[in-house]
Image (cartoon, rainbow, N blue to C red):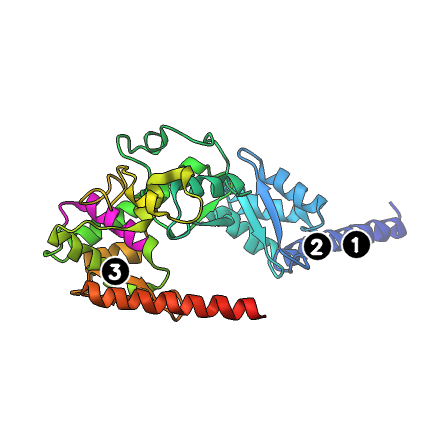
Amino acid sequence: MSRMTLIVVLLAVVLGGSVLAGVFWAGVRSLDEPLHLLAPVRFKVAPGRSFAHVAAELAAQGVVEQPRAWVLYARWKGLASAVKAGEYEIEPGSTPRSLLAKMVSGQVLLHSFTIIDGWRVAELLAALRRSPDIASTLPTRPTDLMQKIGAPGIDSEGQFLPETYRFPAGTTDVELLHQAHLALNRELDAAWTDRDPNIPLQNANALLIMASIVEKETSLPQELGIIAGLYLHRLSMGMRLQADPTVIYGLGDRYEGELRSVDLRTDTPYNTYTRTGLPPTPIALPSAAAIRAAAHPEKTDAIFFVASPKGDGSHVFSSTLAKQNAAVAQYVARQRQKSAASSEK
């Protein structure tokens, strides 16, 4: 081999080595360079999918620029097989290294669903069916709902705690309801254990029923305690609860938006105008605040209440029928004034 040929070969080796070194260091640098994202991107890692396949998919979407370097790094660190399946949200500013760490730790995207205070179970089930993030498995009117969530033998009304729940993609309606029922049990058990010992309730289920009535009677958190105290006062006196929401619940689909005198006289298991004591089941999903209010009611001698003429959702509470009649007269007068003012416009 001539000297010139040897020099050419050596130069080729050096240049080739330089190119390989450059490629290597470019790959290393790419692990800590922000991904090319202008907005968050959602990406699903399917169960059993290899990390090389994941990297190739993200490269095809233009998210990862050097998938080969990413895969080699993951294999070198022993992390390629540790990536968890699930849905991930990739934020702008993420790097391949940080994204790999996220996938290995299983920081999947969590969706949310809120159960509203005072919903009936029927309303909850309808909302679950409308949610695009929850897999529907239940029929429109399931007859074995509590059995499906592992709590057979009890009525489903009132058995799910209103709050916001977070869950991964693929969660079913049954799984979310199971979570909400466990949350209700924790809240109810704690409230019953810590209850005022003087409340006239025999068990935690009675507390739940009372809380559901309190929940439906007011939209103001500051009134929960006094309304609980009022109804428990009636109960301790042997007085009928005379709670309109229980009558409405008993009417079911027959309720047309306004209670009539005939409705108050029509006996059902939920008509607390015709029957003494509590109705047989809760009438709604009570909030944690309503449950606590029923367990620790305000002390009051009031046994009557009516909507306040203020029109802010508050009530006027009275200890005698005479005071109640006066409060009702004030409310009716205020309503007539508002109606007259509206008709003049």
Identify the residue position indicated by label 1 in the image: 15
Depth check, mark 1 against mark 3: the one in front is 3
- Disc 3 versus disc 2: distance between alpha carbons? 77 Å
Label 3 crowd bin: few (<14), some (14–19), many (20+), radius 10 Å: many
Is the residue marked by circle 2 packed among few (<14), some (14-19), or many (20+) residues within 10 Å? Answer: few
Q: Which mark is residue 227?
A: 3
Residue in view at x 10 percent, y 56 percent? 197
How crowded pointer 1 is (Cα within 10 Å; few <14, some 14-19, many 20+) is rated as: few
Provide the residue designation for mark 2: 21
Q: Main secondary structure of the magenta part?
A: helix
Residue 116 locus on image (x, y percent):
41, 52
Q: Which residue is depicted at the point 77% across and 54% down?
A: 14
Can residue 175 be seen here? no
Position of residue 286 measured from the top left corner of the image (x, y, whole percent)? 32, 51
Expressed as whole percent of the image width and height from the top left, the position of residue 196 reads 14, 58
Q: Which secondary structure, mark 2?
A: helix
Q: Which of pointers 1 and 2 lies earlier in the amino acid sequence?
A: 1
In the rendered view of the protein, which quadrant contains the C terminus?
Answer: bottom right
Q: Examine the rendering and report whether any part of residue 13 can be seen.
A: yes
Q: Position of residue 115 (x, y in %)?
A: 42, 49
Q: Give the quarter of the image for residue 11.
A: bottom right
Q: Nearer the viewer, residue 235 or 287?
A: 235
Q: Earlier in the sequence, mark 1 or mark 3?
A: 1
What amino acid is at disc 2? Ala
Magenta residues, as a range? Answer: 201-215
Q: Secondary structure at mark 3?
A: helix
Label for residue 64? none
| Three-letter residue code for mark 3 | Ile
